[in-house]
Structures are given as structure tokens and as C-alpha cells.
Amino acid sequence: MSKVYLSLGSNMGERKVYLEQAVRALSQLDNTELIAVSPIYETAAWGNTNQDDFLNLCCLLETTFLPEDLLEQTQAIESRLGRVRHEHWGPRTIDIDLLLYDDQTLKSAQLTLPHPYMRQRAFVLQPLLDIEPKLTLPNGNKLAEYLEQLDRSDIHYHSELSLS
């Protein structure tokens, strides 16, 4: 089984409900176990900032899916939850990003691992480090050191996820 860290975000409709449904769907994937889920944080939009605030969380899965197969599964979950890709970094019902897959590095047309922007996004690093405070990149760099360099003033604890 491989350890995979994911980031989830939603800024349309019932944001928390979309996160709950996405995490539940991830936990129900074949040969996959949900190991941990971070608290939910509310954050301002990143990239395209002219949109509603996001709810974000991270989770840890153990899975036998290969990275690109898992990406296919996460995109199917996004589609089932109404995700439509209108614009880059635009509003979305749910966004599921693969951040880290074991210690693998990968660059393909569909997927880059580790996620290319995760070190620049406090809304990713904060919940990720809530799960695993000593987490490092495949090159050994500590993610906590990247978070220390970022502005965290627009990241606010929102709630815990309820999957019951």
C-alpha cells in the first residue's frame, strides 16, 4: 500500500457537504483506506481571487492505485459531485489534488508529483501538517519550513469533518 496525501477544496454551494461527500467517496475506493483527515480551514481564493472563499482540508490515504489511476478516480469523484472545469483556478464544487505519493516524483501530461504549487499554498500546508507535522518532500525538505515563510493571516479554522 502506498501513502498518498490529498488536498480538497470547495467554494460553491454547500462547501462542507461537498468535502464530506468527497472524503466519503475516497474512503470507499477499492483497495484504499482513509487513514487521517485534517480539520477544515476557510481561506481566501488563491490564483483567481475574484470568487468566494474556500473550505479546505487534507487527507491521508493508503492505496494500491498507481498515481495516474488514483488521479482518474479522484477526477471521477469530482465529476460525480458536479465539478465543471470552466476556467483555471475558477470556482468549483470540489477540487481534489494529489500532493504526495510515497516519496515518488512524477511529471506527466496529467500529473506532477509532488504537487507543483503546494509549497506556495498555506491553505494546503497547514492542514497537511496537521496530519503529519514532520512531513517532508522526497528531496528531504521539511514542509513546515515552507509554511513558516508564508502569510497565514487568511487561513481560519472552520470545523472538523463529520463522516457519520
Image (tube, rainbow, N blue to C red):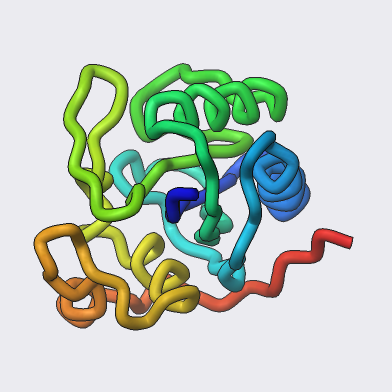
Toward the viewer: 27 or 55?
27
Q: Is residue 150 above or below residue 98?
A: below
Q: Is residue 154 above or below residue 134?
A: above
Toward the viewer: 29 or 97?
29
Q: Position of residue 52 (x, y in %)?
A: 53, 47
Direction from residue 159 to residue 44 in the image, left or right = left
In the current view of this chain or complex, which residue is farthest to the front?
A: 1
Q: Position of residue 66 (x, y in %)?
A: 42, 32
Q: Is residue 74 above or below residue 22?
A: above
Which residue is painted at 46% across and 25% down in the image? 69
Q: Is residue 13 visible?
A: no
Which residue is painted at 31% across and 73% down in the image? 135
Which residue is painted at 42% across and 76% down in the image? 132
Q: Is residue 26 visible?
A: yes
Q: Is residue 132 above or below residue 26?
A: below
Could you tell me which quadrant the C terminus lies in? bottom right
Q: Position of residue 113 (x, y in %)?
A: 25, 42
Direction from residue 27 to residue 9 in the image, left or right = left
Which residue is painted at 54% across and 65% down in the image? 42
Q: Position of residue 71 (x, y in %)?
A: 45, 29
